[in-house]
Amino acid sequence: MLGISTVWKSGEFKDGQELMESLTRLGFSEIELEYRITGDTFKGIRQFLKMTKDVKIVSVHNFFPIPDIHETGGADIFHFSSEDKAERSLAVKYAIKTIRIASDLGARAVVLHLGRVHMDTLSLELFRLYDAGMTGSGEYISKLDEIRMLRDRRRGKTLDMMLLSMDEIQKAAEKYDVNIGIENRYFFEECPNFEEMGAIFDKLGGGRIGYWHDAGHAQVQENLGFVTVKDLLSAYGKFLVGFHLHDAKGHSDHHVPGIGEVDFKLLKKYIKKDTVKILEIHPRETEKDLMAGVDFLKNMGFE
């Protein structure tokens, strides 16, 4: 069944019951709770869930709700890849809290971002060249190589820290009977990249740690020339926990499905009976366009 992330309306509705009603009135009965939600909003969501048995929280996006020590929250406020012991400890601590909440709600999965390599944001320069139609040029290829080499030089012990963190997270996931989906990222400097994902699954794959495929992020990475969607799914599809379903055009993503370049037929090949399927749509998209995207996916056999 297709679910939807609260991100589409969480900026508009701060009352948790109103937020949930804005999604369920459209026919969605499976929901992902995301990291922009405050503790007060979550209280309203809990009240809503007590009043209905027809709606399921199927996934929760870390860190949830917004941690009490942070003002605005976010999926990247603490990095599992950090060499700073205090920051990494906070990432693990608040992720375990998210996992416990997910378990209490009966969710099947928690989605994680793992961090980033600290380097100049050369991706923005790459976007400029891409927009100028220079993807086949020597300058563009040189910029790709520069980004790859700089990331490799700056990554330090980020992989070691991710492995250490995920070992702790795996234990919590086993305790609370929740699967973990490590999400592929939008920016190349973010973690994990393709090779780091492989190293994590070589050590922890087959347990509670799995792969969360973000369709738009993957398409952007392919469009820019880093890694193809086919390579990602061929390598890590066997570890698939769930999808964030949205479309991408160039380096713009979180569009409604069916208007961009994502090959949803390819994605459909990797769906298993228990795969979580979540529409993660930007608030700019209208209700009419969203429902057209839902129809597009349903006509392709996404149920």
Image (spheres, rainbow, N blue to C red):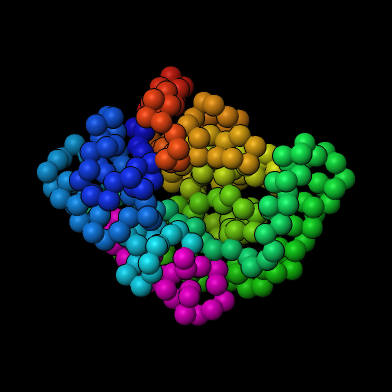
Above or below: residue 243 compared with residue 71: above
The question of residue 247 being in magenta is answered with no
**Identity of the residue furthest to the bottom in this view:** 85
Quarter the C terminus occupies: top left
Give the number of marks: 0
Residue found at x 77% / y 61%: 149
**Identity of the residue furthest to the top in this view:** 299
**Identity of the residue furthest to the right in this view:** 138
Quarter the N terminus occupies: top left
Residue found at x 34% / y 42%: 9
Residue found at x 37% / y 29%: 287
Answer left or right for 68 relative to 118. Answer: left
Residue found at x 71% / y 57%: 122
Location of residue 231 (image quadrant): top right
Q: Position of residue 73 (x, y in %)?
A: 40, 62
The question of residue 86 being in magenta is answered with yes
Q: Nearer the viewer, residue 33 or 273?
A: 33
Q: Position of residue 128 (x, y in %)?
A: 73, 46
Q: Nearer the viewer, residue 53 or 202?
A: 53
Answer left or right for 165 relative to 152. Answer: left
| Magenta residues, start to end | 77-102
| Residue 228 in sight | no
Q: Position of residue 106 (x, y in %)?
A: 25, 50
Above or below: residue 156 compared with residue 122: below
Q: Nearer the viewer, residue 144 or 111?
A: 144
Q: Position of residue 107 (x, y in %)?
A: 29, 49
Main SS, magenta region, reads helix
| Residue 295 in sight | yes
